[in-house]
Amino acid sequence: MKPAHLALLLLALLACRPAAAVELKLPGEHRSVRLGLSQTLIGEYHTDVNVFGGDDSPRYFDLKNRTGLVLQHGSTSFNIRFDAHLFSGVPDEPYNNIVYSNQYSLEKIALSSTQRSFEITAGDFGVRVGRGLALDLTRVDELVRDTTLRGGQFRLTTRHVDGQVFGGWVNPLATDDFTEATVRIPSDVIGGGRVEVRPVPALALGLHYTGGGLESRTLRTRDAVHIIGGSVELPSLADRVSVYVEYDFMRTAQDADVLSGHGAYLNATANLGPVALLLEFKYYSHFRFINTFGDNEWDVQIYHRPPTLMWSKQEILNNHDVIGPRLRLDYRIERWGSTVWASYGHFYRSDAAPDVGFFDSGAQINDAFGGLQQTLRGGALDLTGGYRLDTLTQDGQSITDYSQAFAELELSLAVWRNHSVEAELLYRKVTKSAEDFSEIRLSLGYRPSRWVAGSVSYEYSSEITDSDPTDDITVRNHFGGVTGTFNFTPSSYARLFGGTTRGGVRCIDGFCRQVPPFMGVRLEVVLQL
Amino acid sequence: MRSTMKRLALLTLLTLLTPGCVTGGAGSGPANVPNLSLRDVDGRRHTLSDSIGRKVTVMSFWATWCMPCRQELTMLQELYREHARDGLAVLAINGDGPETVGRVRPYVKQSGWTFTVLLDSENRVAALYNPRKQMPMLHVFDRAGRMAYTHTTFQPGHGPEVKRKILDILRSERGAE
């Protein structure tokens, strides 16, 4: 794309300043059609994809366009998402196993009808069964690939009974957001149902089943997964206590092997004036609902997310063979606008020695973190810090498998009239696989008005990420960039970034991705109606 | 390659121009609200059309890990306390994942929020009103159920503007009664 074309496109975007909502009046129809549009256009020029050095890294341009459209007329809605990914200047040969190819794809399409007592969807839909132990295909953060089931879903809602049945083919996005690799989509099929009975509002009894036929790595057979489970929930006892308990049994047939897994989860909360207590207990044994259908890091489809109340950015090495409790205490000091909190979990792992069981394997996790949430006059401050230690026992001696100390600060503060500052700081010191490294991420932002904002970012890491540290490649430790944002409506903006970002392992709520580094310029234009 | 780029640019331009410049603006007509129902943190069922199309309704998408969401909802709680009797409703649509959804109830109770907090565990409301799943994101519906104002992100300077917009919609609706 020529710069002139891009400029023209931007001018058109800025000139339109669309309204908050668009309602289309149909001839002869008393009710209008609501049109919702979300349009994301991202243009990136990668000046050096391999920011860790080397002469063979390509310099290329890519353009991603995502157009999402919602049409709603009373109880009927139609959703569609169309994506286009275009590349210019990438090498013909795969780079780091990444195949870049132009993609035009109808990613999501769904037609739904919602009535008082039932709801029916044909096309793409997200689904979560219970607390996500038996199935979770809902995108809640930017790290998770937006995966849906493409098929049908029927949901029944009566006064005392909620139920749903569903089935379909797995439909992840065709291009991975982070690596920009063209994704091979597995031919996995998932189906199931759940019924939840509420004889009284304070009690919910649930029963569910999830079955899957997953594309095998060998492509000769289909692996079968069956999960059956139930839950008991007391959502509000005397407005102070809530309890949720779930158990799931999993049976997996992979080629000639048949494996059994178990997942049990308890979550209990109590609100006692300024004090809030939360107790979690989890028991996951051979409890994995994942299809690794290829050799690449992105050839993995994760179908469930067993709960774990860790620090939201915690890298979790194992959440499928683990047992133990966690207790969290929050204390609210109303007159100061403060909440202080502390959380401690102690778990046993069995993956290091599967034959000897949890308590004899010698693999333990101690995880403690806490913090402060402070409301400020015209702003807020969050401070979090903690320490995690995963140990193994070898020859009668306890050794460190993984350890992490971290501190995090997030500040947002009004300084004068519409002027505000934002700051984010993260420090981590990690020991992993006998390697120590530390990292710092800092971002400082200033917003002089409602419409514009600017920020600078800096990252430092001592982690050696090159696969062969003995070669002559210069390892980069420092990364930095500048971002400018212009909001042309309260919900639409254009953002320009120039510089480098480190990437690396990024985790949100137990789900981690290896994010590639970036060096270059990125323009993002988002428009929402 | 160049021609595909041109085609895409043209397509994008047309997509944006059509709704944005030609048909932008709220229409007139009866409420256009789905009958979607969700549970609140105490297990009670709420249907969107119980509020939207009957009251001036603020719909705010949030999660426990989102600091700007907390600031926005603190502002909305103040507004709700002062104007609930004037016909203002607030629906806080929670989007926590399985890992943190267990924290939602104690978080809400401790924050002292008295408006309705709904658990959108399968993104059913988000699919209709927040397909990019941005947080925070806020819509204001007028009493006829039309989406009258949308705002994303929340920085300290945004509070007065968002508050003014909500009150403008509330007052214009009361004036029209």
Image (cartoon, rainbow, N blue to C red):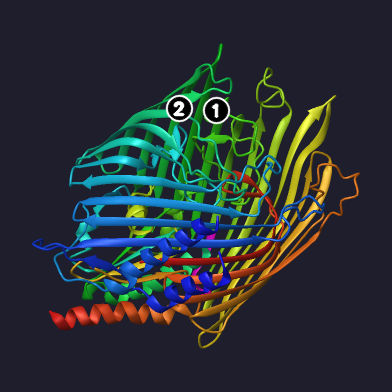
Instruction: Say few, some or many: other residues with alpha carbon within 10 Å of mark 2 (under 14 / 14 to 19 / 20 or more).
Output: many
Q: Which residues are magenta?
A: A331-336
Q: Secondary structure at mark 2?
A: strand
Are the residues flagged by discs 2 and 1 in contact, CB closer than 8 Å?
yes
Residue visible at 45% across and 50% down? Answer: A270
Q: Height in image: B23 above or below A344?
A: below
Q: Residue furthest front?
A: B3
Question: To which chain does the residue with label 1 belong?
Answer: A
Residue underneath mark 1: A287
**Residue at left 32%, top 51%?**
A79
Residue occupied by mark 2: A248
Residue A321, given in percent of the width and then of the height, sits at 61, 29
**How far across and how far down the image is residue A103, in percent?**
50, 47
Name the quadrant containing residue A208. Answer: top left
Mark yes or no: residue A213 visible: yes
Q: Amino acid at mark 2?
A: Asp
When the figure is inspected, residue A242 is found, relative to residue B6, above or below; the finding is above
**In the image, residue A332 lies in the stretch drawn in magenta:** yes
Residue at 32% across, 61% down: A36
Three-letter amino acid code at the position of disc 1: Phe
